[in-house]
Amino acid sequence: MASIFSLIAAGEIPSYRVASDDKHYAFLDINPVAPGHVLVIPRREEDYIFNLSDEEYTDLMLFARRVARALEKAIPCKRVGVAVMGLEVPHTHVHLVPLNSEGDMDFSSKKQIAPEEMARIAEAIAAEFE
């Protein structure tokens, strides 16, 4: 059975897409720790990031870097934090979180963001993606 992230990347479940290509998909986390919190996934379903081939791993991280650069332009922040935990969904995913302090990456504290604001944020990041 496909993971929820595979269904999102396939367009079967709606998402706030910020970037994609034939191998990757990036979208806003619906339970963000900060406004602009993005998840970057490989389209090929793999549970554990270190099970990706060298090429897949490198491609994923290069794609995530491009998304992070767009995120920095769209959301005022000092840096973009990166985390890979992978316990909640059995599909490799990279968290990109706009940071102004280290506390901004507290995964035990989720934000509620209105759908209209999520759409605005996603559009702003997508507009900066190159």
Image: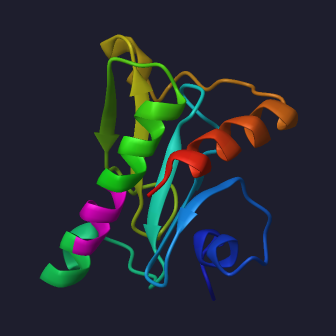
Question: What's the image's color scheme?
Answer: rainbow
Residue 59, image x and y in percent?
A: 26, 73
Q: Which residue is drawn at 31% across and 68% down?
A: 60
Task: Please name the predominant secondary structure of the magenta segment in the image.
Answer: helix
Q: Which of 120 and 26 is in front in this view?
A: 120
Q: Residue at x 63, y 89 (%)?
A: 1
- Residue 28 in the figure: left or right of residue 96: right
Question: Which segment is the magenta one?
Answer: 59-64
- Residue 101 in the figure: left or right of residue 34: left
Residue 23 lies in what quarter of the image?
bottom left
Q: Can residue 53 be seen in this view?
A: no
Residue 93, image x and y in percent?
A: 42, 60
Residue 31, image x and y in percent?
A: 65, 38
Residue 75, image x and y in percent?
A: 52, 27
- Residue 94 in the figure: left or right of residue 74: left
Does 23 appear above or below 92?
below
Q: Residue at x 62, y 74 (%)?
A: 9
Indicate whether residue 39 is drawn in magenta.
Answer: no
State which quarter of the image contains the C terminus.
bottom left
